[in-house]
Amino acid sequence: MTTENLHLTPAESFPEHLEKVSDRELQILDSQVQRQIDHEIVAGGEANPETEFRRYELNEEFGNRESR
């Protein structure tokens, strides 16, 4: 994953263990996934299930980090 990518498509790799990702990288992933969701909704009317699942996983990890 590079910071130059504004979107993270469902075909691109996604970390399997978000708890091992730094806070900075998690924020970048969150931005990329949100941009991808926005793109999918504009282009096709709905988000790809994989992108939605990634959004859910990111939200879960943010919640876990807040409770630590």
Image (tube, rainbow, N blue to C red):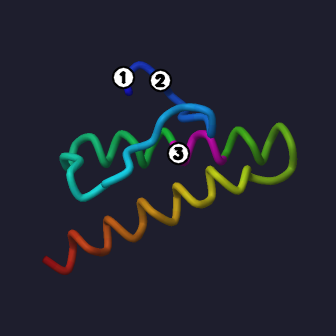
19 displayed left or right of 32? left
Three-letter code, disc 2 = Asn
Say if mark 1 contacts mark 3, CB within 8 Å.
no
The part of the chain drawn in magenta is 33-37
Q: Which corner quadrant of the image does residue 24 belong to?
A: top left
The relative height of residue 45 versus residue 13 in the rendered view (above or below) is below
Q: Distance between the residues labelled 2 and 1?
A: 6 Å
Identified at 52% across, 45% down, the residue is 33
Crowdedness near tag 2: few (<14), some (14–19) or many (≥20) residues, C-alpha within 10 Å: few
On-image quarter of the C terminus: bottom left
Residue that lies at the very extreme toward the front in this rendered image: 16
**61 falls in the magenta region:** no
Relative side of 23 to 33, left or right: left
Mark sitting earlier along the chain (1/3): 1
Label 3 sits on a secondary structure element that is helix
Residue under the point 48% across and 35% down: 13
**Residue annotated with mark 2:** 5
Check disc 3 and report the residue beneath it.
33
Report if the CB atoms under discs 2 and 1 are less than 8 Å apart.
yes
* Residue at the far right in the pictured view: 44
Q: What residue type is labelled 1?
A: Thr
Instruction: Give the amino acid type for the residue marked by disc 3 in the picture.
Output: Val
Towards the viewer: 11 or 52? 11
Above or below, comparing residue 65 to residue 32 in the picture: below
- What residue is drawn where x is 38% and y is 27%? 1
